[in-house]
Image: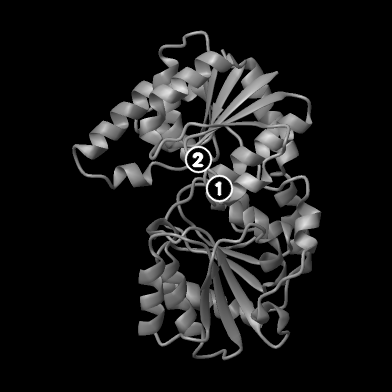
Amino acid sequence: MKICIVTPSFKGGGAEKIAVNLSNHYARSGHIVTLVVAKCVGPYMEQVDPAVKVLDLRASRVRYALWRLFGVLRSERSDVVLSVIRDTNIIAGLAGIFLPAQRLVFREANTMDLVSQMRFPKKWLWLLLLRVAYLRANKIIANSDGTRADLISHGVVKRSKIVVYGNPVLPANFEELVAAPATHPWIKDKNIKVLLNVGRLHKQKNQKMLISAFSEVLKEFSDVRLLIVGEGEERENLIKFCEEKQLDGYIEIIDFQLNPYPFYKGSDLFVLTSSWEGFGNVLVEAMACGVPVISTDCPGGPKSILENGKLGKLVPVDDPRELAALLKREIRSEVDVVRMDWARGRAKEFSVEAIASQYLQIMQNAT
């Protein structure tokens, strides 16, 4: 099968990682894979398998890649085109209007919360573009029930066109990645308990809530530290907030890590404080490494991944006081070994191999 996968870049986002994971898996499975990138920049570029053909559209913004993408899709003549995130879904859908024979499958990566927060006329324009572009898709893969529900309630697509599959998170070399040594001194120090957060430094991820809760935890536990791993536009605001809370020496915000698994494995607790999530790849990664998990009960995938709190604790969105109380209880408690084993088993359901086969069935049967 000849497969074309479209992604914005190779930057350190979940969708970009998924595009690389799927491309590598399909290429190694004998398919002919072309990975089309709006702009060929970012750390994931070095992880692309040599068997994958990479085409750089050289666009400064995804929206400027429309006509170049049209030319690539017309010349490549793939059996199916898979776009992995909303921005590229739109341009793939618009380009596909002029390629009626081309099969298009879109992966919808997030709930509609960000669009809902937009003001008129930007919100109206986004919804119009989504409805027009998604009308061209043969099938849409939503990464959670919440994502599907949002697309339907906003009138973007009909229910019959959407299927729900979780994200292909754990790569084939997962065990190798986990076995790599952790280098951060806090993780090496057995006298310190490390709380970990991994993700974009963005208002959606609400790391400010985590920092507020952590400042309360420190009043009772002086041997706890917080590591936040990621990059984004909120970095300076978060650093300033830490300074205001006088948390220097107790919190560290470190750059994006190409291999975050040693950080998960070496931590004592993983915490996700998002206001909304399409899925929650980081929860799967943490569970696979045997780390206890706390997540906000936000719109999107976390509740489903954690099986309504059976495999990890859920707290209300934007409630630092409740999060602080839960963090204190978890720090005092012994690790529930049985729950961690169940969580590891649940995480394996979202391996690249398992989810890629489900994606492939959709791509083969999309009409």
Question: Disc 1 to disc 2, how far (Cα)?
Answer: 9 Å
Disc 1 marks a residue whose amino acid type is Gly
Q: Quadrant of residue 176?
A: bottom right
Q: Can residue 166 be seen in this view?
A: no
Colour approach in the figure: one colour
Instruction: State the residue position of label 2.
Output: 109
* Residue 132 locus on image (x, y percent): 35, 21
* Image position of 326 with respect to 51: above or below: below
How many marks the image carries: the answer is: 2
User: Which mark identifies residue 200?
Assistant: none
* Residue 364 locus on image (x, y percent): 66, 18
**Residue sitting farthest toward the top:** 101
Between discs 1 and 2, the one toward the N terminus: 1
Q: Quadrant of residue 18?
A: top right
Give left or right: position of 45 versus 58: right
Give left or right: position of 162 versus 293: left
Instruction: State the residue position of label 1.
Output: 14
Question: For numbered disc 2, what is the local secondary structure?
Answer: loop
Question: For numbered disc 1, what is the local secondary structure?
Answer: helix
Mark 1 touches mark 2? (CB < 8 Å): yes
* Residue 244 locus on image (x, y percent): 35, 83
